[in-house]
Image (cartoon, helix red, strand yellow):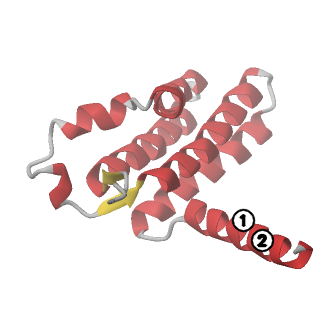
Amino acid sequence: MTTEIRSIPRPLVRTNQWFIVISVLINWLTGIEWILTLPLLAGISGLMFGYNPVMRIARRFLRKQPSDYIPEDWEQQQFNQKIAVVCLAGGLIAYASGLTALGHIFTVMVALAAFIAILGFCIGCFIRFQLSRYKHKKHATNS
């Protein structure tokens, strides 16, 4: 019996990360907060329906078979996307409520996390690892 590991080709993940970073930068440069709805809706769609339109469009531009690229763990990417959705939604709600400083905090967090991931260090992966380590340690203590 084999267990199939779900993965996403790295170029698709990178495209999604760049889309988040660029959307936040456009928001900051233009003051058009509603631009954040684009990566927000793409992220929500990916989480709820397994269909991220940004990745779907980017998939058309892959030059090789998806399996030929470095795979990114699907579950980890779902976790990361949840964090991004919370930050994007928090930023959008804060801006809409006139809480510009709070909007900046949320959008700085998501843009920095996405950009740092592009550079090679996944903050979401680190958070997930620490959470699982904490849960394991807590479970071991209670047993």
Q: Secondary structure at mark 1?
A: helix
Residue type beneath disc 1: Leu
Q: Position of residue 79 (x, y in %)?
A: 58, 50
Q: Secondary structure at mark 2?
A: helix
> Residue at 56% across / 57% down in the picture?
113
Crowding near pointer 1: few (<14 within 10 Å), some, many (20+)? few
Q: Position of residue 108 (x, y in %)?
A: 63, 50
Q: CA distance from mark 2 to mark 1?
A: 5 Å
- Please state the total of marks drawn on the protein image: 2
Picture quadrant where residue 5 is located: bottom left
Crowding near pointer 2: few (<14 within 10 Å), some, many (20+)? few
> Residue at 56% across / 24% down in the picture?
32
Q: Quadrant of the N terminus?
A: bottom left
Q: Which residue is mark 2?
A: 134
Residue type beneath disc 2: Tyr
Say left or right for 130 vs 30: right
Q: Which residue is mark 1?
A: 131
